[in-house]
C-alpha cells in the first residue's frame, strides 16, 4: 500500500515536471516567434531610413552629421545582436525620424510634396506595426519570465537552463 502510494506520488511529480518542461518550451518558442516578428517589423522600418535621410539632407535646419549618423544607425541596427543594444539603436532611429518630420513642418513645399507625404505615411504605418509587434513580444517575455521565476518552477528552469528573456523597449 505504501509503495503504491509512493509510486503514485513519484509518477505525479514526474508528470508535473514533464508538463512544466513542455510549458517552458512552448513559452520559449512563443518568445522566439514573437522576436522574429518584431525583428521583421524593425527591418521593414529600416528600409525607410535612407529615404528619410535623403529628405533630411535637403533641409537647411538639419546638419550633415545628423544625416550621416542616421545612415550609420541603419547598419548598427542590422548588425546588433544584443537586444538591449538593438533597442537603444532603434530608439535613436525613432527619435531621428521625429526630428526630421518635425523639421519638415517648417517647409510648406514638403507638406505638399506627394513623395514626402507617402514616405511620412509609410513610416507612420511601419511605426504602428512595430509598436504592435513590440507589445506582443514583451507580452510573451512577461509570460515566460513569470513562469521561470515562480517557485518551485524557477529551480526547474535553472536546472534545465531556461534563462530569462529581455524586454524590448523603444523609450529613452
Image (spheres, grey):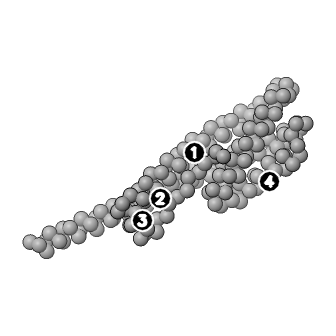
- Give whichever of discs 4 and 1 has the lower sequence position: 4
Relative image position of residue 58 (x, y in whole percent) = 89, 38
Other residues around mark 1 within 10 Å, as few (<14) / some (14–19) / many (≥20): many
Quarter location, residue 80 = bottom right
User: Which disc number belongs to residue 60?
Assistant: none
Position of 71 compared to 166: left or right?
right
Task: Tell me the residue at 48%/51% (across/down).
Answer: 142
- Give whichever of discs 1 and 3 has the lower sequence position: 1
Q: CA gap, disc 2 to disc 4?
A: 32 Å
Q: CA gap, disc 4 to disc 1?
A: 24 Å
Other residues around mark 2 within 10 Å, as few (<14) / some (14–19) / many (≥20): many
Q: Residue furthest left?
A: 1
Q: Name the residue under label 2.
A: 28
Q: Is residue 150 above or below residue 156?
A: above
User: Mark 2: which secondary structure?
Assistant: helix
Other residues around mark 3 within 10 Å, as few (<14) / some (14–19) / many (≥20): some
Relative image position of residue 167 (x, y in whole percent) = 55, 52
Disc nearest the viewer among 1 and 3: 3
User: Mark 4: which secondary structure?
Assistant: helix
Residue 115 appears in the picture as rendered: no
- Give whichever of discs 1 and 2 has the lower sequence position: 2
Q: Name the residue under label 3.
A: 157
Q: CA gap, disc 4 to disc 3?
A: 39 Å
Task: Tell me the residue at 55%/56% (across/down).
Answer: 166
Relative image position of residue 53 (x, y in whole percent) = 82, 43
Disc nearest the viewer among 4 and 1: 4
Q: Mark 1 points at which residue?
A: 133
Disc 2 to disc 4: CB gap under 8 Å:
no
Relative image position of residue 81 (x, y in whole percent) = 65, 61
Q: Mark 4 points at which residue?
A: 72
- Give whichever of discs 2 and 4 has the lower sequence position: 2
Amino acid at each position: 500500500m505504501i509503495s503504491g502510494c509512493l509510486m503514485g506520488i513519484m509518477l505525479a511529480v514526474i508528470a508535473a515536471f514533464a508538463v512544466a518542461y513542455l510549458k517552458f518550451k512552448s513559452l520559449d518558442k512563443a518568445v522566439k516567434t514573437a522576436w522574429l516578428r518584431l525583428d521583421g517589423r524593425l527591418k521593414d522600418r529600416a528600409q525607410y531610413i535612407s529615404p528619410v535621410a535623403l529628405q533630411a539632407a535637403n533641409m537647411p535646419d538639419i546638419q550633415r552629421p545628423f544625416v550621416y549618423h542616421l545612415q550609420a544607425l541603419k547598419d548598427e541596427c542590422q548588425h546588433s545582436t544584443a537586444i538591449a543594444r538593438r533597442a537603444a539603436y532603434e530608439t535613436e532611429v525613432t527619435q531621428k525620424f521625429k526630428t526630421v518630420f518635425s523639421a519638415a513642418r517648417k517647409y510648406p513645399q514638403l507638406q505638399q510634396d506627394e513623395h514626402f507625404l507617402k514616405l511620412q505615411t509609410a513610416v507612420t504605418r511601419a511605426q504602428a506595426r512595430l509598436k504592435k509587434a513590440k507589445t506582443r513580444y514583451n507580452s510573451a517575455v512577461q509570460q515566460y519570465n513569470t513562469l521561470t521565476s515562480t517557485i518551485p518552477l524557477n529551480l526547474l528552469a535553472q536546472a534545465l537552463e531556461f534563462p530569462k528573456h529581455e524586454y524590448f523597449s523603444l523609450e529613452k
